Image (spheres, rainbow, N blue to C red):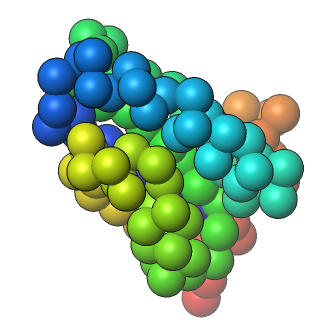
Amino acid sequence: MFLILLDYVAPPAEIDRHVEAHRRHLAEHYAAGKLLLSGPQVPREGGVIIACVRTREEVEAMMRRDPFVVADVVRYRVIEFVARAAHPALGSFIEAPTA
């Protein structure tokens, strides 16, 4: 599982020009079962995405096509993690410990 942190590097008006395209991009990945959660940070300085894909390469490929990245209005950081506990509704995303 991957946590993707987005930091806005452009003025809000420039970010807003790309929001709808960014949301469509995310919707495609939700439909493909690759995303679990996403939304803006509070205060609105960037965003957060939780991706449930197998490899960092998949995350990088997804982010390279993100309209925010293409427009160069965000910088992002990817953090890989292993989910060991979650709310019961998210139980299918928990990985069993390895030996």
In the image, what residue occupies the spot 84% across and 50% down? 31
- Residue 76 picture location, percent across and down: 28, 53
Is residue 1 at all visible to an observer of this figure? yes
Give the quarter of the figure containing the N terminus: bottom right
In the image, what residue occupies the spot 67% across and 39% down? 24
- Residue 50 picture location, percent across and down: 54, 47
Image quadrant in which you'd find residue 46: top left
Q: Is residue 41 left or right of residue 56?
A: left
In the image, what residue occupies the spot 51% across and 74% down? 61
Above or below, 4 relative to 47: below
Is residue 93 at all visible to an observer of this figure? no
- Residue 34 picture location, percent across and down: 71, 59
Task: Work out whether residue 9 or residue 93 is closer to the camera in this orientation and state it.
Answer: 9
Q: Is residue 2 left or right of residue 86?
A: left
Can you name the residue that lies furthest to the top here? 43
Image quadrant in which you'd find residue 95: bottom right
Above or below, 24 relative to 39: below
Give the quarter of the figure containing the C terminus: bottom right
Above or below, 10 relative to 61: above
Q: Is residue 63 left or right of residue 12?
A: right
Above or below, 40 relative to 26: above
Q: Is residue 51 left or right of residue 49?
A: right
In the image, what residue occupies the spot 48% across and 54% down? 66
Task: Work out whether residue 29 or residue 48 is closer to the camera in this orientation and state it.
Answer: 29
